[in-house]
Image: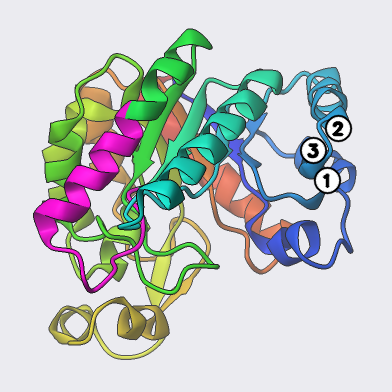
Amino acid sequence: MPKLAAFPKAFMQALCKDGTMTVSEWIELAVKLDIDGLEWYAGFLEMADEKNWAKFRRQVEGHGKVIPMMCCSPDFTHPDAAFRQKEIEKQKRWIDMTYALGGQYCRVLSGQKRPELTLDEGIQLAADSIYACLPYAAERGITLIIENHYKDDFWEYPEFAQKMDVFCKLVDMIEHPFFGVNYDPSNTYIAGEDPLQLLQKVLHRVVTMHASDRYLKYGTIEDLRKEEGGATGYVKRLGHGEIGKGLNDYDAIFSALKSVGFNGWISIEDGVDGMDQLERSVAFVRRKMVEYWGD
């Protein structure tokens, strides 16, 4: 049976920018949900002080929950080797953070889709940088998970490996027991592609999943797929919504994952309209997990 986590999507500004919510306040809200753990974010303001790492772990585990996953955003596609080395060192610190919190999974990304990069150059830079981090992660029992991502909030360009063919090529280049895929079906729509098609291509590499849902603010799915100009247009046309009421087919997704024996963490990255919405999303995903995997 997979386990269920939640991420503070609605409170990122408060936790990471203006400090109007403390991490402890988020923990106390989250533990009331029907979840097994809390997905963490390396950019929480209070995580800058390493003394807080053990404190937050104790607080979460004191409620019978765990911190299984770390969300962070390395940028491995910069053409300057010194820049990439700094990103590798940042990733290693995030691995240390994950380990200190008792986690098992730490996200990696490709990096920004800089216009001067060719496809082969970008993939090679990302693969080499991820390989540089893997021994460090393996020594600590941490699996690096690459997400089919859209764009970090602080990046100028979208994700280099946003498109399915690029993402799959990068995944295929990295064979390591401590490397896998964090599948996010909603991000596939932002790329103008089919989340079920991507899932079939990476199904045997998926070790964790982000559960969310998207809805069309206007127009049709055909309009979305015909749009030109990349991800910017898709984001305007798509919005975050309550899980089970958007575009994602969770029956098809969970059926496919069950067919290959998936037993990892599913983390909910919704609830942008508050805790009531997040609670309903949790309830939906929990029902579907029981339906496909049993109690």
Is mark 1 in CB contact (under 8 Å) with mark 2?
A: yes
Q: Looking at the image, tell me whether mark 2 or mark 3 is earlier in sequence order.
A: 3
The region drawn magenta spans 110-131
In the rendered structure, which amino acid carries the disc numbered 2?
Answer: Asn
In the rendered structure, which amino acid carries the disc numbered 1?
Answer: Glu
- Which quarter of the image is occupied by the N terminus? top left
Instruction: Compute the Cα span from label 3 to label 1.
Output: 22 Å
9 in the magenta segment: no
Q: Is 236 on the left or on the right of 53, as rendered?
A: left
In the rendered structure, which amino acid carries the disc numbered 3?
Answer: Lys
Residue located 26% across and 18% down the image: 176
**Disc 2 designates what residue?**
52
**Disc 3 designates what residue?**
32
113 in the magenta segment: yes
Residue 44 placement (x, y as % from top left): 74, 49
Residue 136 placement (x, y as % from top left): 47, 18
Farthest-out residue, bottom: 219
Eyeballing the image, is 130 above or below 250?
above
Eyeballing the image, is 192 above or below 162?
below
Residue 46 badge:
1
Of residue 80 and residue 194, the one placed in the foreground of this image is: 80
Which quadrant of the structure image shows residue 68?
top right
Eyeballing the image, is 45 above or below 100?
below
Residue 262 placement (x, y as % from top left): 31, 22
Local crowd size for mark 3, using a 10 Å CA cut-off: few (<14), some (14–19), many (≥20): few
Residue located 11% across and 44% down the image: 169
